[in-house]
Amino acid sequence: MSQQQVTIRSKSDIIEFLNNAGPAKNALIVIFTALGGVFIDAYDFTSLGIGAVQLKAQFGLSAFQLGSLTAAMGFGALFGAIFGGYLVDKLGRKRMFYADLWFFVISAIVGAFAPNIEILAVCRFIMGVGVGLDFPVALSYIAEFSSLKGKGKWVNLWQGMWFVAASASFLIILPIYFLGAGPNLWRWAVGFGAVPAIVVLGLRKLFMEESPLWAASHQGLKEAGRILESTYGVKVILDCKPEDLVAPKEETKPKISYSILFTSQYRLRTLITSVIAATQSMEYFAVGFYLPVIFLWVIVGSLVFNCFGIVGGTWQAYVVGKFGSRKLAITGYIIAFVCLLTVGLFKTHLSIYMQALLIGMFIFGHSFGPGAQGMSMARFLTLHQSEDWVRVGAKQWFGQVASLVSISSRSF
Protein backbone atom coordinates (compact mmCIF):
# COMPACT_ATOMS: atom_id res chain seq x y z
CA MET A 1 0.00 0.00 0.00
CA SER A 2 1.50 3.35 -1.08
CA GLN A 3 2.16 6.00 1.49
CA GLN A 4 -0.16 9.03 1.40
CA GLN A 5 1.54 12.22 0.26
CA VAL A 6 0.66 15.64 1.65
CA THR A 7 1.86 18.85 0.03
CA ILE A 8 2.40 21.73 2.46
CA ARG A 9 2.65 25.24 1.03
CA SER A 10 1.48 27.21 4.06
CA LYS A 11 0.03 26.81 7.53
CA SER A 12 -3.48 26.66 6.04
CA ASP A 13 -2.56 23.37 4.36
CA ILE A 14 -1.73 21.90 7.77
CA ILE A 15 -5.06 23.08 9.15
CA GLU A 16 -6.85 21.57 6.15
CA PHE A 17 -5.07 18.26 6.59
CA LEU A 18 -5.78 18.04 10.32
CA ASN A 19 -9.45 18.94 9.87
CA ASN A 20 -9.95 16.13 7.38
CA ALA A 21 -7.35 13.59 8.49
CA GLY A 22 -8.21 10.10 9.57
CA PRO A 23 -7.09 8.72 12.93
CA ALA A 24 -3.44 9.29 13.75
CA LYS A 25 -1.18 6.52 14.95
CA ASN A 26 -1.96 5.83 18.63
CA ALA A 27 -4.75 8.43 18.36
CA LEU A 28 -6.73 7.19 21.36
CA ILE A 29 -3.61 6.88 23.49
CA VAL A 30 -2.59 10.44 22.65
CA ILE A 31 -6.03 11.91 23.34
CA PHE A 32 -6.52 10.09 26.62
CA THR A 33 -2.97 10.95 27.68
CA ALA A 34 -3.82 14.61 27.11
CA LEU A 35 -7.00 14.08 29.12
CA GLY A 36 -4.85 12.54 31.84
CA GLY A 37 -4.18 16.05 33.06
CA VAL A 38 -7.92 16.52 33.58
CA PHE A 39 -7.96 13.26 35.54
CA ILE A 40 -5.26 14.60 37.86
CA ASP A 41 -7.01 17.97 38.17
CA ALA A 42 -10.24 16.29 39.23
CA TYR A 43 -8.53 13.88 41.61
CA ASP A 44 -6.67 16.65 43.41
CA PHE A 45 -9.76 18.85 43.65
CA THR A 46 -11.86 16.08 45.20
CA SER A 47 -9.24 14.25 47.28
CA LEU A 48 -9.19 16.69 50.17
CA GLY A 49 -12.96 16.47 50.53
CA ILE A 50 -12.71 12.74 51.24
CA GLY A 51 -10.92 13.30 54.52
CA ALA A 52 -12.37 16.69 55.38
CA VAL A 53 -13.86 15.44 58.65
CA GLN A 54 -10.56 13.87 59.80
CA LEU A 55 -8.57 16.89 58.63
CA LYS A 56 -10.78 19.27 60.58
CA ALA A 57 -10.43 17.18 63.74
CA GLN A 58 -6.65 16.65 63.42
CA PHE A 59 -5.80 20.34 63.11
CA GLY A 60 -8.73 21.64 65.13
CA LEU A 61 -9.98 23.78 62.26
CA SER A 62 -12.91 26.14 62.40
CA ALA A 63 -15.44 26.23 59.55
CA PHE A 64 -13.74 29.37 58.25
CA GLN A 65 -10.28 27.76 58.29
CA LEU A 66 -11.53 24.64 56.50
CA GLY A 67 -13.28 26.75 53.90
CA SER A 68 -10.15 28.86 53.38
CA LEU A 69 -8.02 25.74 53.00
CA THR A 70 -10.49 24.39 50.47
CA ALA A 71 -10.38 27.65 48.55
CA ALA A 72 -6.56 27.69 48.43
CA MET A 73 -6.50 25.35 45.44
CA GLY A 74 -9.09 27.51 43.71
CA PHE A 75 -6.93 30.59 44.23
CA GLY A 76 -3.98 28.72 42.75
CA ALA A 77 -6.04 27.69 39.73
CA LEU A 78 -7.14 31.29 39.30
CA PHE A 79 -3.51 32.40 39.32
CA GLY A 80 -2.47 29.64 36.92
CA ALA A 81 -5.34 30.41 34.56
CA ILE A 82 -4.23 34.05 34.24
CA PHE A 83 -0.84 33.03 32.86
CA GLY A 84 -1.46 29.45 31.75
CA GLY A 85 -2.96 30.19 28.35
CA TYR A 86 -0.21 32.68 27.52
CA LEU A 87 2.53 30.23 28.51
CA VAL A 88 0.88 27.49 26.46
CA ASP A 89 1.12 29.66 23.36
CA LYS A 90 4.59 30.95 24.22
CA LEU A 91 6.35 27.71 25.19
CA GLY A 92 4.31 25.18 23.27
CA ARG A 93 1.91 22.41 24.22
CA LYS A 94 4.54 19.73 24.76
CA ARG A 95 6.74 21.71 27.15
CA MET A 96 3.76 22.80 29.20
CA PHE A 97 2.49 19.23 29.33
CA TYR A 98 5.69 18.26 31.10
CA ALA A 99 6.07 21.33 33.29
CA ASP A 100 2.61 21.52 34.82
CA LEU A 101 2.63 17.91 36.02
CA TRP A 102 5.55 18.62 38.36
CA PHE A 103 3.24 20.98 40.24
CA PHE A 104 1.01 17.99 41.02
CA VAL A 105 3.79 15.57 41.95
CA ILE A 106 5.73 17.76 44.37
CA SER A 107 2.75 19.44 46.00
CA ALA A 108 0.95 16.11 46.54
CA ILE A 109 3.92 14.49 48.28
CA VAL A 110 4.76 17.49 50.47
CA GLY A 111 1.08 18.11 51.24
CA ALA A 112 0.60 14.54 52.46
CA PHE A 113 3.29 15.11 55.13
CA ALA A 114 2.24 18.66 56.01
CA PRO A 115 2.68 19.22 59.77
CA ASN A 116 0.29 22.19 59.88
CA ILE A 117 -2.45 23.92 57.96
CA GLU A 118 -0.15 26.64 56.61
CA ILE A 119 2.10 24.23 54.69
CA LEU A 120 -0.92 22.27 53.48
CA ALA A 121 -2.51 25.48 52.21
CA VAL A 122 0.66 26.35 50.26
CA CYS A 123 0.73 22.88 48.70
CA ARG A 124 -2.92 23.13 47.72
CA PHE A 125 -2.25 26.52 46.17
CA ILE A 126 0.61 25.05 44.09
CA MET A 127 -1.69 22.21 43.00
CA GLY A 128 -4.17 24.81 41.88
CA VAL A 129 -1.54 26.58 39.80
CA GLY A 130 -0.96 23.27 38.02
CA VAL A 131 -4.69 22.97 37.32
CA GLY A 132 -4.82 26.48 35.88
CA LEU A 133 -1.88 25.68 33.62
CA ASP A 134 -3.03 22.24 32.52
CA PHE A 135 -6.57 22.89 31.31
CA PRO A 136 -5.64 25.31 28.50
CA VAL A 137 -2.86 23.07 27.20
CA ALA A 138 -4.91 19.85 27.34
CA LEU A 139 -7.97 21.18 25.53
CA SER A 140 -5.96 23.17 23.00
CA TYR A 141 -3.91 20.10 22.16
CA ILE A 142 -6.94 17.84 21.79
CA ALA A 143 -8.74 20.33 19.54
CA GLU A 144 -5.68 20.81 17.35
CA PHE A 145 -4.99 17.08 17.20
CA SER A 146 -8.57 16.05 16.31
CA SER A 147 -10.26 16.12 12.92
CA LEU A 148 -13.14 18.53 12.40
CA LYS A 149 -15.65 15.69 12.58
CA GLY A 150 -14.50 14.41 15.96
CA LYS A 151 -13.32 17.65 17.53
CA GLY A 152 -16.42 18.37 19.58
CA LYS A 153 -16.63 14.82 20.91
CA TRP A 154 -13.01 14.60 22.02
CA VAL A 155 -12.88 18.09 23.57
CA ASN A 156 -16.15 17.51 25.46
CA LEU A 157 -14.98 14.17 26.79
CA TRP A 158 -13.01 16.06 29.45
CA GLN A 159 -16.17 16.21 31.57
CA GLY A 160 -16.59 12.44 31.64
CA MET A 161 -12.91 12.12 32.53
CA TRP A 162 -13.42 14.53 35.45
CA PHE A 163 -16.05 12.29 37.04
CA VAL A 164 -14.07 9.13 36.27
CA ALA A 165 -11.24 10.66 38.30
CA ALA A 166 -13.59 11.72 41.09
CA SER A 167 -14.96 8.17 41.27
CA ALA A 168 -11.45 6.70 41.13
CA SER A 169 -10.41 8.78 44.10
CA PHE A 170 -13.10 7.14 46.23
CA LEU A 171 -12.26 3.64 44.94
CA ILE A 172 -8.61 4.21 45.79
CA ILE A 173 -9.33 5.49 49.29
CA LEU A 174 -12.03 2.92 50.14
CA PRO A 175 -9.62 0.05 51.02
CA ILE A 176 -7.36 2.48 52.87
CA TYR A 177 -10.37 3.60 54.91
CA PHE A 178 -11.25 0.02 55.88
CA LEU A 179 -7.60 -0.75 56.68
CA GLY A 180 -7.80 1.81 59.46
CA ALA A 181 -6.27 5.04 58.12
CA GLY A 182 -8.27 6.88 60.76
CA PRO A 183 -7.29 10.53 61.24
CA ASN A 184 -4.68 10.29 58.45
CA LEU A 185 -7.18 9.39 55.75
CA TRP A 186 -6.80 12.81 54.15
CA ARG A 187 -3.00 12.37 53.99
CA TRP A 188 -3.37 9.16 51.98
CA ALA A 189 -5.92 10.82 49.69
CA VAL A 190 -3.74 13.85 49.00
CA GLY A 191 -0.44 11.99 48.69
CA PHE A 192 -1.72 9.37 46.28
CA GLY A 193 -2.32 12.15 43.75
CA ALA A 194 1.39 11.99 42.90
CA VAL A 195 0.98 8.46 41.48
CA PRO A 196 -1.33 9.23 38.52
CA ALA A 197 0.68 12.41 37.87
CA ILE A 198 3.89 10.39 37.44
CA VAL A 199 2.10 7.85 35.23
CA VAL A 200 0.66 10.55 32.97
CA LEU A 201 4.03 12.30 32.82
CA GLY A 202 5.63 9.10 31.56
CA LEU A 203 2.89 8.50 28.97
CA ARG A 204 3.23 12.05 27.67
CA LYS A 205 6.95 11.58 27.17
CA LEU A 206 6.41 8.31 25.32
CA PHE A 207 3.49 9.12 23.02
CA MET A 208 3.05 12.87 22.56
CA GLU A 209 4.54 15.11 19.91
CA GLU A 210 4.21 18.89 19.75
CA SER A 211 1.01 20.23 18.18
CA PRO A 212 1.68 20.63 14.44
CA LEU A 213 -0.31 23.88 14.41
CA TRP A 214 1.81 25.39 17.17
CA ALA A 215 4.97 24.14 15.46
CA ALA A 216 3.92 25.75 12.17
CA SER A 217 3.46 29.11 13.91
CA HIS A 218 6.55 29.02 16.12
CA GLN A 219 9.04 26.51 14.70
CA GLY A 220 8.41 26.64 10.97
CA LEU A 221 6.77 24.36 8.40
CA LYS A 222 9.71 21.95 8.30
CA GLU A 223 9.21 20.93 11.93
CA ALA A 224 5.42 20.88 11.49
CA GLY A 225 5.86 18.56 8.51
CA ARG A 226 8.10 16.24 10.52
CA ILE A 227 5.44 16.01 13.23
CA LEU A 228 2.76 15.16 10.67
CA GLU A 229 4.94 12.40 9.25
CA SER A 230 5.66 10.99 12.70
CA THR A 231 2.08 11.25 13.94
CA TYR A 232 0.03 10.33 10.88
CA GLY A 233 2.44 8.17 8.91
CA VAL A 234 2.22 10.33 5.76
CA LYS A 235 4.88 11.64 3.39
CA VAL A 236 5.09 15.44 3.59
CA ILE A 237 6.25 17.40 0.54
CA LEU A 238 7.24 20.98 1.39
CA ASP A 239 6.52 23.46 -1.39
CA CYS A 240 6.93 26.80 0.36
CA LYS A 241 9.22 29.79 0.69
CA PRO A 242 12.59 29.13 2.39
CA GLU A 243 11.80 31.56 5.19
CA ASP A 244 8.63 29.59 6.04
CA LEU A 245 10.64 26.45 6.73
CA VAL A 246 12.19 27.84 9.89
CA ALA A 247 10.87 29.54 13.00
CA PRO A 248 9.47 33.01 12.27
CA LYS A 249 11.10 36.03 13.84
CA GLU A 250 9.52 37.30 17.04
CA GLU A 251 8.30 40.52 15.46
CA THR A 252 6.40 38.63 12.75
CA LYS A 253 4.35 36.54 15.18
CA PRO A 254 0.74 37.63 15.77
CA LYS A 255 0.16 39.67 18.93
CA ILE A 256 -3.02 38.53 20.67
CA SER A 257 -4.38 39.85 23.96
CA TYR A 258 -7.47 39.36 26.11
CA SER A 259 -8.92 42.57 24.67
CA ILE A 260 -9.92 40.66 21.52
CA LEU A 261 -12.65 38.97 23.56
CA PHE A 262 -14.43 42.29 24.02
CA THR A 263 -14.43 43.46 20.41
CA SER A 264 -17.74 43.64 18.59
CA GLN A 265 -17.02 40.34 16.85
CA TYR A 266 -16.72 38.31 20.06
CA ARG A 267 -18.35 40.41 22.81
CA LEU A 268 -21.68 38.57 22.98
CA ARG A 269 -20.07 35.13 22.80
CA THR A 270 -17.62 36.15 25.52
CA LEU A 271 -20.55 37.16 27.76
CA ILE A 272 -22.44 33.91 27.15
CA THR A 273 -19.47 31.62 27.76
CA SER A 274 -18.42 33.62 30.84
CA VAL A 275 -21.90 33.31 32.36
CA ILE A 276 -21.93 29.56 31.73
CA ALA A 277 -18.37 29.18 33.07
CA ALA A 278 -19.23 31.07 36.25
CA THR A 279 -22.61 29.50 37.00
CA GLN A 280 -21.56 25.92 36.30
CA SER A 281 -18.62 26.31 38.69
CA MET A 282 -20.84 27.76 41.38
CA GLU A 283 -23.46 25.02 41.12
CA TYR A 284 -20.93 22.19 41.06
CA PHE A 285 -18.62 23.30 43.88
CA ALA A 286 -21.56 24.27 46.08
CA VAL A 287 -22.62 20.63 46.06
CA GLY A 288 -19.97 18.41 44.47
CA PHE A 289 -17.05 19.20 46.77
CA TYR A 290 -19.18 18.57 49.85
CA LEU A 291 -20.63 15.23 48.77
CA PRO A 292 -18.36 13.36 51.22
CA VAL A 293 -19.91 15.21 54.19
CA ILE A 294 -23.54 15.21 53.06
CA PHE A 295 -24.36 11.52 53.55
CA LEU A 296 -23.37 8.98 56.18
CA TRP A 297 -21.77 6.40 53.93
CA VAL A 298 -19.50 9.09 52.59
CA ILE A 299 -17.15 7.12 50.35
CA VAL A 300 -19.63 4.69 48.77
CA GLY A 301 -22.29 7.39 48.49
CA SER A 302 -19.92 9.82 46.78
CA LEU A 303 -18.81 7.10 44.38
CA VAL A 304 -22.42 6.48 43.34
CA PHE A 305 -23.06 10.19 42.81
CA ASN A 306 -20.01 10.54 40.59
CA CYS A 307 -21.23 7.65 38.45
CA PHE A 308 -24.11 9.93 37.44
CA GLY A 309 -21.46 12.41 36.33
CA ILE A 310 -19.62 9.77 34.29
CA VAL A 311 -22.83 8.90 32.43
CA GLY A 312 -23.79 12.51 31.75
CA GLY A 313 -20.28 13.68 30.94
CA THR A 314 -19.62 10.82 28.52
CA TRP A 315 -23.04 10.80 26.86
CA GLN A 316 -22.96 14.51 26.03
CA ALA A 317 -19.63 14.09 24.23
CA TYR A 318 -21.29 11.76 21.74
CA VAL A 319 -24.46 13.81 21.15
CA VAL A 320 -23.05 17.36 21.16
CA GLY A 321 -22.34 17.12 17.44
CA LYS A 322 -26.02 16.35 16.79
CA PHE A 323 -27.73 18.81 19.15
CA GLY A 324 -25.10 21.51 19.74
CA SER A 325 -23.61 22.93 22.96
CA ARG A 326 -26.37 25.51 23.45
CA LYS A 327 -29.21 22.97 23.67
CA LEU A 328 -27.23 20.66 25.94
CA ALA A 329 -26.33 23.54 28.27
CA ILE A 330 -29.97 24.64 28.56
CA THR A 331 -31.15 21.06 29.17
CA GLY A 332 -28.52 20.54 31.86
CA TYR A 333 -29.40 23.81 33.59
CA ILE A 334 -33.08 22.81 33.74
CA ILE A 335 -32.28 19.40 35.26
CA ALA A 336 -29.91 20.92 37.83
CA PHE A 337 -32.39 23.69 38.73
CA VAL A 338 -35.32 21.31 39.25
CA CYS A 339 -33.28 18.89 41.36
CA LEU A 340 -31.73 21.50 43.65
CA LEU A 341 -35.02 23.38 44.07
CA THR A 342 -36.84 20.18 44.99
CA VAL A 343 -34.24 19.16 47.56
CA GLY A 344 -34.12 22.66 49.03
CA LEU A 345 -37.89 23.12 49.38
CA PHE A 346 -39.06 19.61 50.22
CA LYS A 347 -36.11 18.04 52.05
CA THR A 348 -38.13 17.27 55.19
CA HIS A 349 -40.77 15.48 53.11
CA LEU A 350 -38.34 13.38 51.06
CA SER A 351 -36.77 10.09 52.05
CA ILE A 352 -32.99 9.85 52.17
CA TYR A 353 -33.11 7.73 49.02
CA MET A 354 -35.11 10.30 47.09
CA GLN A 355 -32.71 13.04 48.21
CA ALA A 356 -29.80 10.92 47.03
CA LEU A 357 -31.47 10.34 43.66
CA LEU A 358 -32.07 14.05 43.18
CA ILE A 359 -28.45 14.89 44.04
CA GLY A 360 -27.34 12.23 41.58
CA MET A 361 -29.60 13.66 38.88
CA PHE A 362 -28.21 17.12 39.65
CA ILE A 363 -24.70 15.79 39.01
CA PHE A 364 -25.97 14.19 35.78
CA GLY A 365 -27.56 17.45 34.59
CA HIS A 366 -24.46 19.43 35.43
CA SER A 367 -22.07 17.09 33.62
CA PHE A 368 -24.40 16.68 30.63
CA GLY A 369 -25.01 20.41 30.25
CA PRO A 370 -23.19 23.48 31.57
CA GLY A 371 -20.28 21.64 33.16
CA ALA A 372 -19.07 20.36 29.81
CA GLN A 373 -20.46 22.98 27.44
CA GLY A 374 -18.94 25.96 29.25
CA MET A 375 -15.47 24.67 28.48
CA SER A 376 -16.16 23.59 24.90
CA MET A 377 -17.96 26.83 24.00
CA ALA A 378 -14.97 28.78 25.28
CA ARG A 379 -12.66 26.59 23.23
CA PHE A 380 -14.56 27.40 20.03
CA LEU A 381 -15.23 31.05 20.88
CA THR A 382 -12.79 32.45 18.34
CA LEU A 383 -11.76 31.27 14.90
CA HIS A 384 -7.97 31.36 14.82
CA GLN A 385 -5.58 28.86 16.39
CA SER A 386 -3.29 31.65 17.59
CA GLU A 387 -6.04 32.81 19.95
CA ASP A 388 -6.40 29.46 21.76
CA TRP A 389 -4.74 30.69 24.93
CA VAL A 390 -7.06 33.70 25.10
CA ARG A 391 -10.37 31.88 24.95
CA VAL A 392 -9.52 28.83 27.07
CA GLY A 393 -7.57 30.83 29.64
CA ALA A 394 -10.41 33.33 30.01
CA LYS A 395 -12.97 30.57 30.53
CA GLN A 396 -10.76 28.96 33.16
CA TRP A 397 -10.34 32.32 34.90
CA PHE A 398 -14.07 33.08 35.10
CA GLY A 399 -14.79 29.56 36.26
CA GLN A 400 -12.23 29.71 39.07
CA VAL A 401 -13.55 33.06 40.32
CA ALA A 402 -17.03 31.57 40.58
CA SER A 403 -15.82 28.37 42.24
CA LEU A 404 -13.96 30.42 44.86
CA VAL A 405 -17.14 32.32 45.67
CA SER A 406 -19.05 29.05 45.96
CA ILE A 407 -16.50 27.17 48.09
CA SER A 408 -15.54 30.08 50.33
CA SER A 409 -19.18 30.92 51.08
CA ARG A 410 -19.50 27.56 52.83
CA SER A 411 -17.08 28.82 55.49
CA PHE A 412 -19.64 31.10 57.06
Image (cartoon, rainbow, N blue to C red):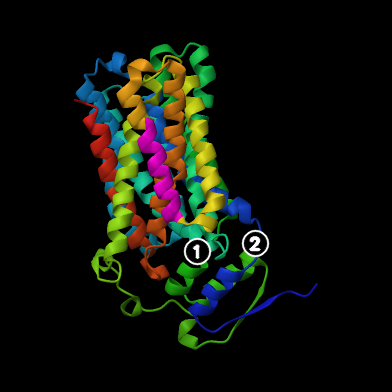
Q: Nearer the viewer, residue 298 or 185?
A: 298
Q: Is 259 situated left or right of 285 in this image?
A: left
Q: Amino acid at mark 1?
A: Glu
Q: Position of residue 152 (x, y in %)?
A: 51, 57
Q: Position of residue 392 (x, y in %)?
A: 36, 57
Q: Amino acid at mark 2?
A: Pro
Can see residue 218? yes
Q: Quadrant of the N terminus?
A: bottom right
The span from disc 1 to disc 2 (Cα, nearest Å) is 13 Å
User: Per the image, is 398 magenta?
Assistant: no
Can see residue 210? no
Q: Is residue 296 above or below residue 37?
A: above
Instruction: Examine the residues drawn in magenta and state their main secondary structure.
Output: helix
Give yes or no for contact between labels 1 and 2 (Cβ–Cβ under 8 Å): no
Local crowd size for mark 1, using a 10 Å CA cut-off: few (<14), some (14–19), many (≥20): many
Q: Is 125 situated left or right of 338 in this image?
A: left
Q: Quadrant of the C terminus?
A: top left
Residue where numbered disc 1 is placed = 144
Residue where numbered disc 2 is placed = 23
Q: Secondary structure at mark 2?
A: loop
Q: Is 222 situated left or right of 25 in this image?
A: left
Local crowd size for mark 2, using a 10 Å CA cut-off: few (<14), some (14–19), many (≥20): some
The magenta span reads 325-339
